[in-house]
Image (cartoon, helix red, strand yellow):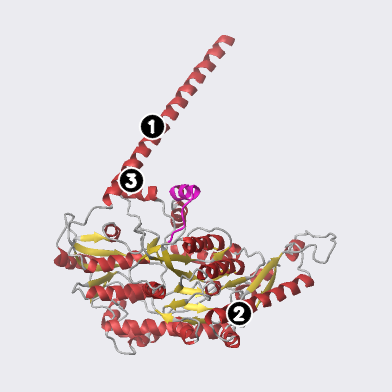
Amino acid sequence: MKDLIYSIVNIFRWVGRFLTSVRIWTLNIAFIALLFFIITAIGSQSTKKVSDISTSGILLLSLSGDIVEEKQNSDPISEVINEKLGFNTLPTETLLQDVLDAINSAATDDNVICILLDLAKLKSVGLNQLQLIGQALTDFKESDKLVIAAEDFYPQKSYYLASYADEIYLNPMGAVDLHGIGTFRLYFKDAIDKMKVTYNVFRVGSFKSAMEPIMRNSMSPEAKKQNMTWLTVLWNTISKDIIRERNLDADAIEIYTENIPSELATAGGDTARLALESGLVDGLKTREELRNYLVTISGRNSHGNFQRIRFNNYLNTISKSYLDNGLDEPSVGIIIAQGPILNGKQPIGTIGGDSLAQMIRNARTDSNINALVLRVVSGGGSVFASEIIRQEILEFKKTGKPIVISMGSMAASGGYWIAADADEIWASPVTLTGSIGIFAAIPTFEESLSAMGIYNDGVGTTSLASFLNLTRPISPLLKESISISLRHGYDQFLNIVSEGRAIDKAQVSRVAEGRVFDGQTAMDLGLVDKLGDMKDAIDSAARLAGLTEYSAHYIRKPLTVKDEIMQIFSGKITDWLLSVALPPSLLTLAKNLIMPIQELLLFDDPKGLYAHCMIHDLSL
C-alpha cells in the first residue's frame, strides 16, 4: 500500500514538472515572439519616418487631447503595438508647434489639397494657442487652398477655431455651443470644519484667492471683481474674433448667447437650424453627405472614402521647427517651463527648481548658445523653487547673453517671479499674468484626532519644540514667525518686480496684492514689455544678441536610464481603466474634486511659502 501511494505521488509530481516546463517554455516563446515583433515594428517605424506622402489628398488636421507646449514622455512600444494591431488610439497630448509646422508646410505642399479640421477629441487648450493656430490657418488660406470644418457638434473652443475655416458644416442633429466663459471652483470650508481639520492660512494680498476654497464657502467679492475684469477681456476677444472671421453683425454673438430660448423657439427648437440661420455655419450635412462632398474635392480612395492624409503621418514627412541641427553655429536656445513649480528635479509637465535651473545653467555654459528664450506656462508654486530658478537666470545674465521670457496662456505668481528679471517679457494679449502675492497653508489635525479619542501630549525644551507637528496646534510663536516670514517674502516679491521691471516699488504695490491681468493690461502697467508669440520672442532675443544668421532649437532635459525605462513601461493603462470604469460625467466630477486637493498635496516648499495662481478651471 505504501508503494502504491508513493507511485501515485511520483506520477502527480512528474505531471506537475511537465506542466511547469510547458508553461515556462510557452511563456519564453511568447516573450521572444513579442520581442521580435517589437524590434521589427520599431524598425519599420523608423523607415516610415523618412517616407513621403505619395498620394495627394485632404490633410486631416486632428487636434486630439490637450494642446501643450512640450509633450510628456510617451510610451513608444505601446504606440507601435497599437499601430501594428490596427488600434485607432488618439494621443492624449498634441504639441502646439507640430500643429503650426503641419499647417505651414501644407501651404506649399502640392500633395495637400485642403485642410479638414478634426476637432471632436480636442480637450484642454489655451485661447492664445487657438489664436496661433487660427493665424496659421489664415496664412494657409493665402495659398488659395480651402480650410473646412465639419463636426457633429461644436463645443465652444472647437467652434472658435472652426470660425477660421472657409466653410463650416454641421450635422443636422448637431449644435453650436456658445455660452461665454467663467471661472468656477469648489469650496471646502464646511467640509473641512466637519472633518475638524484646522487649516492655518497666511496670505498677503486682498486679491490672492488661491486659498479661498479652504477659507470660504463662496468666492470673495474681491476675487469676483478681478476675475470678471479679465474674463470680460477674454470673452470680448473671442466674440470679436468670431464676428470678424464669420462676417457677422456686431451683436450676433450676444443675441445668440443671451436670447437662446427665444432664438431657439424661432427655429422650432432645432439647434442645427438655429446655427445655420445665425450664420455660424455654412451648411448642414449628414456624415454621408459630407463624405460625398469631400470626395468631389479629393477623389475617392480604395475604401470608398475621400483621399486623406492623416496628421500624424504627415508630421513624419516634414521638417519640424526648433530641432537642434548639430551644427557649430550661433543659436537661440529655447526652454519650455510648463506646469506647477516644485522643488528638486521634476518630469516634463512640471517645473522643477533644480531641473530647470540645471537646464538654464547648461545654456549659460554652452558657447554655441548666444541667447535664451524661456517659454513660461505656469500658475506658479513653491517660492523657494521659483527663487532658485530666478537666481540661475541672474547668473545667466552675467554672461552678457540676453534672456527673453515668452509667456503662454498663463505665467502668474511664481511664473511671474521667475520672469521679472529677464531682459524682455513677451506675452499674448490674452495671457493671464501678474498675481503678485504669496501665501502659506498648514493643516493640523488635533481636533480630528480628539474626536476619535486620540490625543498628543509631551514636553520640550523650547516653545518651538513641537514645531510643525501636525497632530498639535501651531504655537502662537510659530504663527507669528510664519506671518513675519510671509510679509518678508511678499516684500521680496515686490522688490524683484520693481528692480527687474524698473518700476517704482510703490507703483508695483498698487498693482500687486494677487491681482491677475490679461496681457494687454499687463503691458500697459509695465509688467510686460511687448505683445507677440514665441517666434517674436526668439527674433527679439537674437536681435538683442546681435545675431543676423542663427538657428533656434529646444533645450531638452536629458532622459536618465530610469526615465527611459519608465517611458517604455508606463503606458496609458491607468487612463484606459478610468475611461472604461467611469463615464465622462463622473470623470469630470472626480477631476474637479481631486485637482485642487492634488495641487495642495504637491506643494513642497521648505518654508511653506507659495506664489501660486489657481485659475486652472477656466473652460473655453
In this view, the residue in front, 461 or 8, is: 461
Instruction: Report how far apart the C-alphas of labels 2 and 3 lie in the structure.
Output: 53 Å
Q: Is residue 98 above or below residue 242?
A: above
**Label 1–label 2 contact, CB within 8 A:** no
| Disc 3 residue type (three-letter) | Ile
Question: Element under label 2?
Answer: helix
Residue drawn 53% across the image and 13% down it = 7
Disc 2: which residue:
495
Q: Of the residues under marks 2 and 3, which one precedes in the sequence?
A: 3
Q: Sort mark 2 into few (<14), some (14-19) or many (20+) by Cα contacts within 10 Å.
A: some
Query: Mark 1 is on which residue type?
Result: Ile
- Among the 4 quarters of the image, the one containing residue 266: bottom left
Q: Please say whether residue 180 is visible from this viewpoint.
A: no
- Span colored in magenta: 555-568
The C terminus appears in which quarter of the rendering? bottom left
- Residue at image mark 3: 42
What mark, if any, has residue 513 been given in the picture?
Answer: none
Give the mark nearest the N terminus, 1 or 2: 1
Question: Number of marks in the image?
Answer: 3
448 lies left or right of 352 = right
Q: Nearer the viewer, residue 577 or 522?
A: 522
Question: What is the secondary structure assignment of the residue under circle 1?
Answer: helix
Residue 29 badge: 1
